[in-house]
């Protein structure tokens, strides 16, 4: 996604490795188990200056 000055605030990553998908689900407090058994997931990573805004803190 193009932004001014080339700043990339959002990044999308496709994960297909079942072990990694399970670990991603484990690190989320609520709702993470919903991705267990998925063939692939899309992880949306957002850069933020405030770590308290993250579900994964």
Image (cartoon, rainbow, N blue to C red):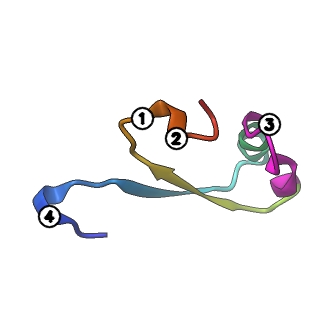
* For the residues bearing labels 3 and 2, Cβ distance under 8 angstroms: no
The circle on residue 50 is 1
Mark 2: give few (<14), some (14-19) or many (20+) Cα within 10 Å.
Answer: few
Screen quadrant of the C terminus: top right
Pointer 2 residue: 53
The answer to which quarter of the image holds residue 11 is bottom left
Gap between marks 3 and 2 measured at Cα:
19 Å
Q: Picture coordinates of residue 41 (x, y %)? A: 68, 60
Q: Earlier in the sequence, mark 4 or mark 2?
A: 4
For the point 16% across and 58% down, the residue is 6
Q: Picture coordinates of residue 14 (x, y %)? A: 58, 59
Gap between marks 3 and 4 measured at Cα:
35 Å
Q: Earlier in the sequence, mark 3 or mark 2?
A: 3
| For residue 44, side relative to residue 15 (left or right) | left
**Tag 4 secondary structure:** helix
Q: Earlier in the sequence, mark 3 or mark 1?
A: 3
| For residue 2, side relative to residue 32 (left or right) | left
The circle on residue 4 is 4
For the point 21% across and 54% down, the residue is 7
Q: Earlier in the sequence, mark 1 or mark 4?
A: 4
Q: Picture coordinates of residue 17 (x, y %)? A: 71, 48
Q: In the rendered structure, which segment of residues is drawn in magenta?
A: 26-36
Mark 4: give few (<14), some (14-19) or many (20+) Cα within 10 Å.
Answer: few
* For the residues bearing labels 1 and 2, Cβ distance under 8 angstroms: yes
Gap between marks 1 and 4 measured at Cα:
21 Å
Gap between marks 1 and 2 measured at Cα:
6 Å
Up-down relation of residue 27 to residue 25 (above or below): above
Up-down relation of residue 54 to residue 39 (above or below): above
Does the magenta portion include 19? Answer: no
Q: Nearer the viewer, mark 1 or mark 4?
A: 1
Pointer 3 residue: 26
* For the residues bearing labels 1 and 4, Cβ distance under 8 angstroms: no
């Amino acid at each position: 996604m193009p932004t001014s000055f080339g700043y990339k605030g959002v990044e999308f990553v496709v994960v297909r490795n079942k072990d990694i998908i399970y670990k991603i689900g484990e690190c989320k407090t609520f709702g993470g188990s919903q991705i267990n058994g998925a063939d692939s997931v899309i992880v949306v990573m957002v850069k933020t200056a405030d770590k308290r805004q993250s579900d994964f803190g």
